[in-house]
């Protein structure tokens, strides 16, 4: 990574005793880029963030900021600001004092910070005035200037979160690290605050690594999304790409709400992926260059499912119930005598008059069927000389 660039983690490995937490994780964030690191609880997201911040150290690998190796530097010397899930505000200090503290620690000497003597030392007054101006500017940006004389206990959750952001912003760091900063907020405030964070990032232009388990936050906020499972980065891509073109079955399952429909299939003698269950097997993907008997999974997003009249070339499904969500309706279906649930995302007009127990044929466009190998890797389907070639 060239000088002046953003934050990079190369080959990060971390073990806690005999437990492997991170397995050779490499992630590079360009200058000013917003990357959301998303995955289930316990996948290693926070550990990776702590290593980037200098609160923990890797067993192997290195951390770079602006092209310089900072792996061995203390957290205080990294020019990186971290926003914690718990806000980590000092309850006995006012908002103004909480925001000013990191600047005081950086700009004032130990002697200048002494309660009585410090104020009379040369340079203390000028530095203190500069700190106050920086705090006022950050508070105005976050619209918390009217809260500067309150203490954390007098603030709402959303206000405390803004103060935590302000304390990070006031330092003008080279990088922001955020560890699930919205998890303690209610749903409405969470949506509002994530918009504010995106706008704040746009104004500051600072490289940001944002950890969350909420895919909606990741997809709506980030320039790129990094999906982590079991201490391994499975895919890093822009939000639209990671949704439409998942490179692993686990990514396809984790990203998207409702979850992607997955149908087990087996490649037959003529290279067709045939649904492995049902009285009348249906070829879901044809012309596969795979050995007969190879198991695969066919992924279909709920919005790509359409209900049609039963036919020999359509998977038979039975409507279980309808779930109305205002502008859309989720049709809960069952495939193969009720053993496999399928969800279709439809508009209200498509379900008018439908009742539970009715049978349909499941229809999707061939381009909307994602093929995954038994090990979870995505198989790309490309037409070659009248057939379909697959490349894992």
Image (cartoon, rainbow, N blue to C red):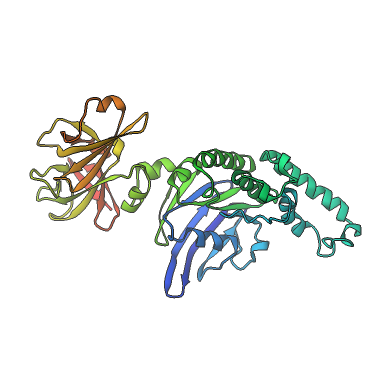
Question: Position of 382 compared to 103: left or right?
Answer: left
Residue at the far bottom in the pictured view: 17
Position in image of residue 291 (x %, y %): 15, 55
Residue at the far front in the pictured view: 154
Position in image of residue 157 (x %, y %): 59, 46
> 99 above or below 73?
above
Q: Total of numbered circles in the picture?
A: 0
Query: In front: 202, or 180?
Result: 180
Say which quadrant the N terminus sits in. Answer: bottom right
Query: In front: 348, or 284?
Result: 348
Residue at the far left in the pictured view: 279
Viewer can see residue 246: yes
Residue name at image x 49 percent, y 56 percent: 27
Viewer can see residue 169: no
Classify residue 144 by image quadrant: top right
Classify residue 257 by image quadrant: top left
Question: Position of 39 compared to 112: left or right?
Answer: left
Question: Position of 334 compared to 326: left or right?
Answer: left
Query: In front: 193, or 356?
Result: 356
Position in image of residue 375 (x %, y %): 27, 58
Question: Position of 345 compared to 263: left or right?
Answer: right
Query: In front: 292, or 185?
Result: 185
Position in image of residue 77 (x %, y %): 68, 62
């Amino acid at each position: 990574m060239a000088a002046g660039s953003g934050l990079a983690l190369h080959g990060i490995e971390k073990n806690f005793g005999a437990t492997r937490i991170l397995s050779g994780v490499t992630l590079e964030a360009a200058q000013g880029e917003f990357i959301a690191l998303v995955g289930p609880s316990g996948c290693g997201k926070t550990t990776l963030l702590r290593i980037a911040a200098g609160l923990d150290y890797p067993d192997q690998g290195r951390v770079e900021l602006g092209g310089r190796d900072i792996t061995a530097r203390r957290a205080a010397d990294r020019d990186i600001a971290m926003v914690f899930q718990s806000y980590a505000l000092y309850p006995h200090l006012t908002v103004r004092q909480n925001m000013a503290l990191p600047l005081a620690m950086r700009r004032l000497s130990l002697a200048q910070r002494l309660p009585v003597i410090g104020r009379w030392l040369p340079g203390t007054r000028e530095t203190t005035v500069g700190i106050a101006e920086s705090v006022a500017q950050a508070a105005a940006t976050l619209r918390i200037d009217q809260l500067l004389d309150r203490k954390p206990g007098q603030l709402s959750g959303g206000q405390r979160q803004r103060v935590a952001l302000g304390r990070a912003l006031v330092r003008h760091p080279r990088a922001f690290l955020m560890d699930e900063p919205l998890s303690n907020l209610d749903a409405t405030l969470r949506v509002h605050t994530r918009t504010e964070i995106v706008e704040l990032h746009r104004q500051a232009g600072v490289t940001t690594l944002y950890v969350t388990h909420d895919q909606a936050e990741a997809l709506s906020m980030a320039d790129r999304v990094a999906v982590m499972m079991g201490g391994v980065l499975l895919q890093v891509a822009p939000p639209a790409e990671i949704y439409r073109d998942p490179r692993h079955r686990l990514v396809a399952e984790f990203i998207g709400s409702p979850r992607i429909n997955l149908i087990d299939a087996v490649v037959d003698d003529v290279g067709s992926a045939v649904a492995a269950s049902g009285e009348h097997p249906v070829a879901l993907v044809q012309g596969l260059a795979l050995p007969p008997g190879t198991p695969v999974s066919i992924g279909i997003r709920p919005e790509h499912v359409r209900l049609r009249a039963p036919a020999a070339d359509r998977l038979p499904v039975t409507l279980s119930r309808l779930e109305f969500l205002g502008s859309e309706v989720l049709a809960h279906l069952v495939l193969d005598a009720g053993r496999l649930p399928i969800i279709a995302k439809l508009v209200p007009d498509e379900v008018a008059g439908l009742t539970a127990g009715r049978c349909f044929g499941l229809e999707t466009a061939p381009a909307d069927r994602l093929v995954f190998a038994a090990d979870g890797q995505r198989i790309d389907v490309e037409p070659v000389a009248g057939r379909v070639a697959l490349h894992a």
